[in-house]
Image (cartoon, coloured by chain):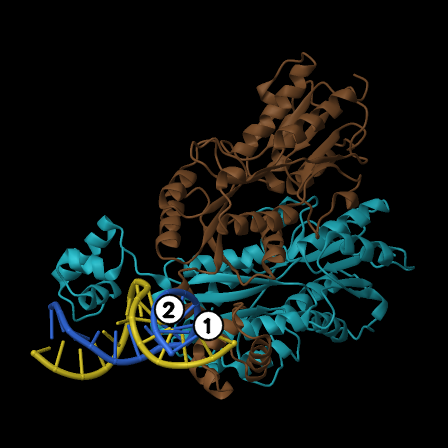
Chain colours: A cyan, B brown, C yellow, D blue
Amino acid sequence: MKLKEFAKQLGLSPTTVSRALSGYPEVSEKTRKRVAEEAVRLGYRPNINAVRLVTGRAGAIGVVMGRNEFQFSEFMSGMAERLDSEDIDILVSPVADHDMKAELQLYSRLATSGRVDAVIIHSPKPNDERILLLHKLGIPFLVHGRSETNVPHAWLDIDNEGAIRRATSHLLDLGHRRIALINGRDGLTFTLHRDKGYREALEQRGLPFDPRLVTHGQFTDEIGFRSARSFLEQSPRPTAFVAGSMMTALGVYRAVRSVGLVVGKDISVIAHDDVFPYLTADNMVPSLSTSRSSLRAAGARSADLTLQLLTGRPATEIHELWPVELILRESTGPAPEA
Amino acid sequence: MKLKEFAKQLGLSPTTVSRALSGYPEVSEKTRKRVAEEAVRLGYRPNINAVRLVTGRAGAIGVVMGRNEFQFSEFMSGMAERLDSEDIDILVSPVADHDMKAELQLYSRLATSGRVDAVIIHSPKPNDERILLLHKLGIPFLVHGRSETNVPHAWLDIDNEGAIRRATSHLLDLGHRRIALINGRDGLTFTLHRDKGYREALEQRGLPFDPRLVTHGQFTDEIGFRSARSFLEQSPRPTAFVAGSMMTALGVYRAVRSVGLVVGKDISVIAHDDVFPYLTADNMVPSLSTSRSSLRAAGARSADLTLQLLTGRPATEIHELWPVELILRESTGPAPEA
DNA sequence: TTGAAAGCGTTACCAT
DNA sequence: ATGGTAACGCTTTCAA
């Protein structure tokens, strides 16, 4: 059913019906109520593409996902929670990991074809081409993570530096002196921030930084395992690990067990937890100490901030840094005697 | 830049330009080439919403995700692989788990507002309201999974029944007699199929079915742990587990270890693996025997079949059942002597 | 092979 | 408070 036909059935003009449905103030309360009821009864709903054409709004926020990210659905669920009440869709454009050229083309396409009103991007680098391009394209965008790219941009990030600094400091407090860091993909801002937090904790104690105790890579259990195994072969071996994700932590636990050591006793572990419904730190054995920040909450807030961006709030005002909790459980304990 | 302006710059009519860009045959090769090149050079791209309005096509396929599904991004990545070359977007509409009313409203909205050309739904029930509604709405849709709902519908499913039958049979071959099944959410078709495969394997040996050896629930490590723990408290306890997912298997491994038993020796485990890049059966210790089927491949094929649906292939023709591999690793071994 | 003009379904301006 | 009408940017007849 189209507007014209629907309006005719109500004995009103299309104009009035449109206004009633969109909640304009100049329509009488009585008319509005009648229109709303009849729309439900007769099943009328505006054609979204006509609306989009005439208003110039796409009614969708785009998110670009890497293909191997288990964290992604969690963030998106959060977005959905916030967007549920709005009439805004989520357009997902997956891109192959590490294919920057394809990703840049994608943004051009999204922007110039009017598919989305705004875009959310993840895992930026300090100097990020995507941010530069999106700025140039003039499409509103929010960065989940931080970048030093020298154009104004809205961002939401967690305090990765502080999180890892505190985690590392805590391990130092427990007497650990050789602490290994299994960090994220090289070159990404959050990875750099975590490296930095780690080094700061060491510096605060006047301890030297040993590059042999840091690795970089994707957040998979395999990389967690391999990194941990290779650390454990060092002599003297580290007595504590800081792991980048829950999946990494699984690999670390496995590696520690595989050499006959015990997590929480011989080896302490702290991992970063994005809070997943299907895999929880409390349930690991021993339960896993974590730095924790809800990815779902970040998704919800990101959607919210993007909406603000769309209603004209300047990007330069939107900078949000979230603290990260440190939650101590059984996987951390005093450093064993040497 | 708009069509009119772009056409003027080329000294052509909007009509010709539109035809050239859309690959109509009546445009001269020379003109087409020139138009294509200039479009890139000047950055012209048709406004997608105008195209959608005039053609009546939405240019998007909708997928509805439950909020707690770690499997989801894998399926979507697969869809994306197939859709990359087409000019079709993925519209993600998350719904709260178990909120059927909200989900049904969502479909109405998607369909009647013209946001999507087709929809893919997951985890159907034997009698599924969503299928009934989508059929009534007249919007093309594909079911990932199977249903007995009595309206024609396209579907793609894996052979859950055969997978679990074979897994169970294999354990029986190894001499196991008390085999526990940690299955999916109650009432869903794939859960029923797995239950069925399990019972068939028992029946083939003339063994009785013991309902105390089957649980149902979400695919989380916690439920895997709890179910396994409670099974292990039985006397005599089961000597083998069939687990519904990789996350479940993590919980099972943990439970077995927690009571001082050894997977692959005291307790055999087979789990279903949807193939994740970040958590692999080969890497578990002991490596995990699995029934395996790539969720990513299913996503790619689902997108493909949906595209076929859109080009007129009848839904009744689109029924695809995928076999599931059984991959034996170290987590399965002979039943221990009683 | 190319072009002119109608039309897709809605919103928003300008009247009344 | 309500209605008429132009306009959104494109595709697709119809005509040349």
Instruction: Using the rendered image of the protein, determine whether residue B64 is visible from the camera's viewpoint.
Output: no
Image vertical order of residue B173 relative to residue A126, above or below: above
Q: Quadrant of residue B292?
A: top right
- Chain letter for mark 2, please: A
Give the x, y percent position of residue A144: 56, 69
Q: Position of residue A75 (x, y in %)?
A: 54, 59
Q: Between disc 2 and disc 1, whose residue precedes? A: 2
Name the residue nearer the viewer: A167 or A183.
A183
Quadrant including the C terminus of chain A = bottom right
Residue B58 is left or right of residue B225, and the answer is left
Name the image quarter holding residue B222: top right
Query: Residue at coordinates 19% horizontally, 70% vertically from top-left?
Result: A25
Given contact means CB atoms under 8 Å apart, are the residues at marks 2 and 1 in contact? yes
Q: Residue at x 76, y 38 (%)?
A: B288
Q: Quick check: B56 left or right of B224?
A: left
Q: Identify which residue, B223 or D12, lies in the foreground.
A: D12
> What number of labels is visible?
2
Q: CA distance from mark 2 to mark 1?
A: 9 Å
